[in-house]
Image (cartoon, rainbow, N blue to C red):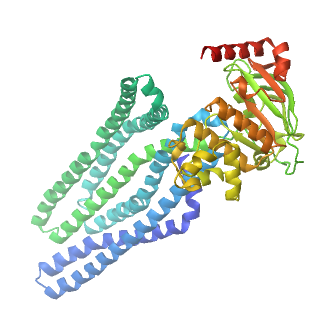
Amino acid sequence: MLLRLLRHYLRPHWKLLVGVLIFQLAQSIAALFLPALNANIINDGVLKGDTNYILRYGGIMLLITVGQVICSIVAVYFGAKAAMGFGRDLRGAIFHRVSVFSEREVSKFGAPSLITRTTNDVQQVQILVLMTCTLLVSAPILAIGGVIAALQQDVGLSWILAIAVPMMLIAIGSIIIRVVPQFRALQKRIDTVNRVLREQLTGIRVVRAFVREKVEVDRFDLANKDVTASALRAGRLFALVFPLVMLIMFSTSVAVQWFGAFRINDGTLQIGTLSAFLAYIIQILTAVMMATFMAIMIPRAAVSSDRIAEVLATESSVVPPLAPVTTLRSAGTVEFRGVSFAYPGAESAVLKNLDFTVAPGTTTAIIGSTGAGKTTLISLMPRLFDVTDGEVLVDGVDVRDLDPDLLWSRIGLVPQIGYLFSGTIASNLRYGNPDASDDDLWTALEIAQAKDFVKETPDQLEATVSQGGTNFSGGQRQRLAIARALVKKSEILVFDDSFSALDTATDARLRAALTKRARGTTRVVVAQRVSSILDADQILVLDHGEIVGRGTHAELLASSETYAEIVNSQLKAEEVA
């Protein structure tokens, strides 16, 4: 899988990779020439006292060294550029894949894991690409070229090389085999830390309200210690590499000089040749060390590439139609025909045999106990999920046959939690309609009962909104989210318990403004508060995923026992208050 990812996402950067190969080859060849020239200077210059020879070949060595440095810099630059481009493209591919996931796929992976895969896992593969361009390309050239050059200098000492290289490969290979499982476990534990931290930051108010700080600190500490333990186990194994490499390199150097000294004493080996042979031995072992160092990085990158490929290979359960419908009559009709829905692996369906129609320009309210399936029901309209059985139709067309952009343009969804993006109030309101004028924004704010508090802010429409809208209260965020949906000017407005953070008076004014100013817009409202749906044209009562009552408020009081119980329980609660 690692090779497949590299092949696919490095293909656009092939020119840079060719440049890396050319310049790394040039600098490696230059590095192989230097020991031989140094041997000539010692043998034919220093020992013979020929100053001109020393200066002439010394100048050649200097020019080759300058060329080597320049080639190395250019090769590293090209390699870094290719690696950064690779990382950018891979992160973009993951982001675009996740952006088309339905709620089902996002829940399957989990937000913390998707974040880790997009950041940490991509970084591991990106580092591998960078190190390959800067180290691994030159390693085989130096190793093979070094062996040939060393044999040209002296064959008699080559047996030392035949012992040293296998020793290094065996020593480092045994470490690599043990470190791979540790890297695999480490990535999973990083997922866990991200998940725990995300939960704690998101639920910080709940943590403080229930005085659970110590419990959450202990929970994070446990996850953090697991990551630390895995990293330490991998680090301890990894720390053995360099001492072993240094031991083998220095032992080889001592052996070369020890046995070479006897050859020099016998007159069968020159001092310069011994110096060159020793330099080539160091080059060869360094190249082997670089290759094995890369071999340590490859397993971790392979683990990360598998996790990345798992995301890229996952298709959304909400598949765009092959021949989508791209035009609709502007009516705003929503119809459910025999709709059932079950989550994957669930024992029973959440929604069962739902049949109802929301007429254009009317308000349909959905009420029921917690877990009745209200949010799931409205999630089927914009096709956040696909129905298990039956059909959901918008203006007479099955949502599975509609072009997704057309469907989403017809529906303005206000979620239960009014999430705002970092930026300004204006940028948030224009999220669904970038061309909206300031007058459009103020009109939407007025209908959503948000105009007063926005005018009170010093910068008004340009007031700063922090991530998630945390610099506004829950009620203010809900009203801004409602205004955002109104600015979109969709034919169908869907409110998922979007008035829960509003007081009764504000709720009443907002509903009255919607009725007066958004006339002709189809509205579907999920509510827990009966007072929010008293004037609805149609009320659907859900119980365990089934419609157990439908009609107006007055009709349901007389015909639906479930609805009457909900109304009576809320009235009693209000009387007690």
Determine if residue 270 is in view: no
Q: Is residue 349 above or below residue 150?
A: above
521 relative to 288 in the view: left or right: right
How far across and down, in percent of the image, does residue 120 sit?
Answer: 46, 46
Q: Residue at x 51, y 41 (%)?
A: 470
Q: How many marks?
A: 0
The one of 438 and 421 positioned closer to us in this rendering: 438
How far across and down, in percent of the image, does residue 49 sit?
Answer: 10, 83
Occupied quadrant, residue 26? bottom left
47 relative to 529 in the view: left or right: left
Determine if residue 218 is in view: yes
Q: Is residue 392 above or below residue 66?
A: above
Q: Residue at x 72, y 13 (%)?
A: 568
Q: Residue at x 40, y 26 (%)?
A: 216
Quarter placement of the C terminus: top right
The one of 153 and 275 positioned closer to us in this rendering: 275
531 relative to 307 in the view: left or right: right
Quarter placement of the N terminus: top right
How far across and down, in percent of the image, does residue 136 sit?
Answer: 41, 58
The residue lying furthest to the bottom in this view is 52
Occupied quadrant, residue 361? top right
Q: Is residue 556 above or below residue 181?
A: above
How far across and down, in percent of the image, does residue 400 sit?
Answer: 81, 40
